[in-house]
Amino acid sequence: MNIKPNAYETIVGLEIHVELGTFSKMFCRCKNPTLADKPNTNTCPVCLGLPGALPYTNQQAIESCVKIALALNCEINNSSFFERKNYFYPDLAKGFQTSQYLHPFGEKGYLDIQVPVILGTRQLAETPESKNDPGQARINEASAKRARMTKMINKRVGITRVHMEEDTGKLMHSTVDGKEVSLIDFNRSGVPLVEIVTEPDIRSGEEAKIFLTELQKIIRYLGVSDADMEKGHMRLEPNISLRVVGEAELPPYKVEVKNINSFRFVEKAIKFEEIRHKELLDKGEIPVQETRGWNEFKNKTVSQRSKEEAHDYRYFPEPDIPPIEFSDEQIKKIKESIPELPSIRVQRFEVDYGIKQYDAQILTKEKSLADYFEQAVEIGKEHKVNPQKIAGFIINKKINIDQVLPATLIKEILEASSMESINEDKLQNAIKQVLGENSQAVTDYKLGKTQVVGFLMGMVKRTLPEAKNNDQIREKVIEMLE
Amino acid sequence: MKIDVKKIAKLSKLTLTASEEKEFGGQLNNIVEYIEKLNAIDTKGIEPTAQVTGLKNVTRNDNYTDDMLTQEQALSGDKNVHNGLFVVDKLVDTNK
Amino acid sequence: MDITNFTISDILNGYKEKKFSVGEIIKFYLERIDKLNPELNAFVTIDENAIKNAKDLDNSLARKRFNSQPLFGIPLGIKDMFLTKDVRTTAGSKVLENYIPPYSATAVTKLIDAGAISLGKLNCDAWAHGSSGENSDFGNTLNPWNKDYVPGGSSSGSAVSVAASLVPFATGTDTGGSIRLPASFTNTVGLKPTYGLVSRYGVIAMASSLDSIGHFTKTVEDSATILNVTAGADGYDSTVAKREKENYLKDLNKDIKGLKIGVPKEYVTNALDKDTKQVFEKSIKTLGDLGAEVIEVSLPNTDYAIATYYIIQPSEVSSNLARYDGIRFGNDRSYFGKEAKRRIMLGTFTLSSGYYDAYYKKAMQVRTLIIKDFTDVFSKVDALVAPVSPTPAWKFGSKNDPLQMYLSDALTVPVNLAGIPAISVPAGFSENKLPIGIQFIGPHFSEKLLFQIGSSFEKKTEHYKQTPLLR
């Protein structure tokens, strides 16, 4: 078989659903539920889809959606409306999802991410044995990775749209009375959900993961959602296809992997699909356009063809919700409420504070940590503590920012530094005095009794209480003894 | 325009008998033929009306109520419940 | 004491003068229901708490609320499209045969809070789909004026319950004529308020952009009394306008001298049956006698209203009925009757991929033109007068073709498409003694004006005083 390595290029677009952390649901006054709530205790006629119930829009939710759209550099539609997306599924209470189709709140945006490019790979020798030994092959693969030389470059991922919709109920699968069934909890039904769709600009599982990590950071910075993967706040759907390198057209198919709940699984699913598609394409087949699911126990995607019918969502304007309009003034106001985003902050930390890029990246992972660092820098200024020292201290000592106030932190840094640097002349004078007063000890030392150093250090400290740095004192005492 | 009754019934989640299919097919095609009289009007450039109130931006503040349905009330319409959950026939489970 | 044909104000006056107690009134109506309903089939569910609720109002402390509750002790019938907490609500369909809602519609809550006492739930075409009342899964409701004839739909039970004095007033819904048509077939007053004046919350949705929540009474005054209670925002229906509260009783006794009332020529065509035309012409003359200036006007797109309506309405129906999947409540979708299935499929088709622009979008554009017709005409006249139906009630089973049935709404649907108010008032009878109504139509939120015109007309003609002979 003639397989050319790197003959294909992976094309990935992402669909991301983010549950907003509002107090109430999207179209009703139900409490936004927590996972601790008992099933079906967080519902009302609206989100349970009872007859006669009508939606009433949550203002905070739509502003949060616009915030996300603005943070992703989208154009905001001044005039928009909700639409009904009609389909049947047992977890969809109303038989339609209230969503946006024609005029999403935001469209045509982008997000810049830093992705590694491979400058070259050191080729490792491959023995015939190792080729057939999967264990050995894995080791070789790992070594190859280590041998790669990479550089980070800026990459712009297009954002197609950012729109507002509502979550569905939650399905579980179980056996009841010996029968396999599905169970539904409608607590989650009607929770505000923002859907973010990217252009097919992503080229690997690794890039997808980098994109998602940056997006998660942004959402947390905006304070619109905890974006906690474990709690299902972010749900991910990569659309994957492969094309021959050099082709410009999008492939004539794509495979959607639904509802993945971790960045790692997205990366794995993309890698799994890359291999699967490659095998099919090499045989001259085009992979079936379908929806697949990620099986986290078997580490593979599985076809959900049974669900795959020609979708016809029959969108039409939601008659129960008046249109939503944003004036330029309002959009400006929302824009102004957006905090400095992590990528900008990294740059500013490097330039303004002169700290290392690596440290800046760690410090900006969470907005609260970055804020803490800046507060500490401000206080540190008065005491002439340089920012890199503060950055290093926070990172190396793994400071718990919820327990140590910035002012306390600076005090700790100052104390630690005072140990390091006591005036050399002062110390020298003190040691001179101590050695003069303890001639017996000096003699003992010269006879080889090095343990007297400890005694002498104690005497120095008594004479000069501000001397705290034992290393410094020991060094000086020994130097002067000799 | 001829309606594909089978396809539309499926999209509507309705199960029709063969005689219903035939009956509805004829009736629906008659109705569609009638509503196509709108084709006589030139609507180029005319704004569609989805709502008649002229209202805009009718929203509420993000406050929640404690006055939600109890679990018992939420489940009261269904006989097939288990541990506080609605029970339906088995659906696709990707982790199986 | 014969209290048949009592109006709401008659009953309130009786309470005031201590002629009878609330218990006595409720007992009278319940007995009448007992006697007449088995044949008329207006009620599908009787509220078992009615007698107890009446007793509660009769204690001396509750009596003090007489002055603050505008509907103190007034019996009420509720169309079975309105949810009533703990009382079965069926929408006239087997799908909801055993459905007990956990909450009540805003309109119901407002009426009960105003002192009204529900006697039960009223029959209607399943899901309010129908012009004759023949689509109910709980059997036909008979027209008390002639039991071989349809009462009109979809609010068939509501119209009949008021016409037969089973209750002095009843709620209804009007999506394409479902209040006005049965009102005109039963010699009752039917109000279809402006879209967005009365909350739809808790009323089973038929077509959301068209549904209007109204009521049936014997007189125009009673109609205004009820609207005073039901109108206004509730914070649960975001299409209800937040407006200053009006007193709809205020202009009832004002004359209509000098008012300009238009007659849309497209409504008075050869399609009108002879009796209907005669009654209508006589009514125009009466309006002239009352001092109004009656002039001919034109609503040029009237002929497209039914086609427009039968795209928009089924489209919304198909979506609104999607929640009835038998999972959380009710029976599964196989329980839908034929008319619901037809409309669901029609709407699914007109919204489906590839056809949306040709049907749904086109209909929304024509809707704009129909609205403009009304806007233009209301710059020339204060209100319009028109027949409600091209014919009086027809015999059961005589309209078998769905399209022919749809066309009977030709004179009522334009009002719904425009979202404007209209009131149907009794205007006379056909040769074979079937009631014929006329409708007054006004611009958005002109209910007070419509009550003024309707009341003048009613006082002059007094058709409401005629009652069907019932044994």
Image: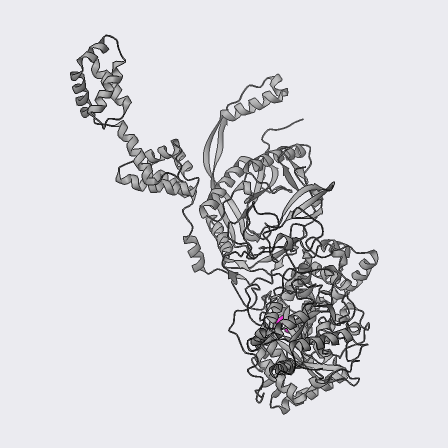
Q: Nearer the viewer, residue C466 or A21?
A: C466
Residue at (65%, 89%) from the top-left corner? C460
Question: Could you tell me what secondary structure mostly forms the magenta stretch?
Answer: helix
Work out whether C319 lies above or below C262. Answer: above
- Give whichever of A188, C370 is nearer the camera: A188
Quick one: A415 or C386, which is closer to the camera? A415
Frontmost residue, A151 versus B43: A151
- Count of numbered circles in the view: 0
- Residue A311 in view here: yes
Q: Looking at the image, which residue sits at the far bottom?
A: C289
Up the image or down, A15 lies above or below A105; here it is above
Q: Residue at x 25, y 17 (%)?
A: A455
Furthest residue in direction right, as rendered: B19
Q: Is residue C62 magenta?
A: no
- Give the residues drawn in magenta, as a range: C415-419
Residue A109 percent across, percent down from the top left: 50, 49
| Residue beneath the point at 77% across and 65% down | C137
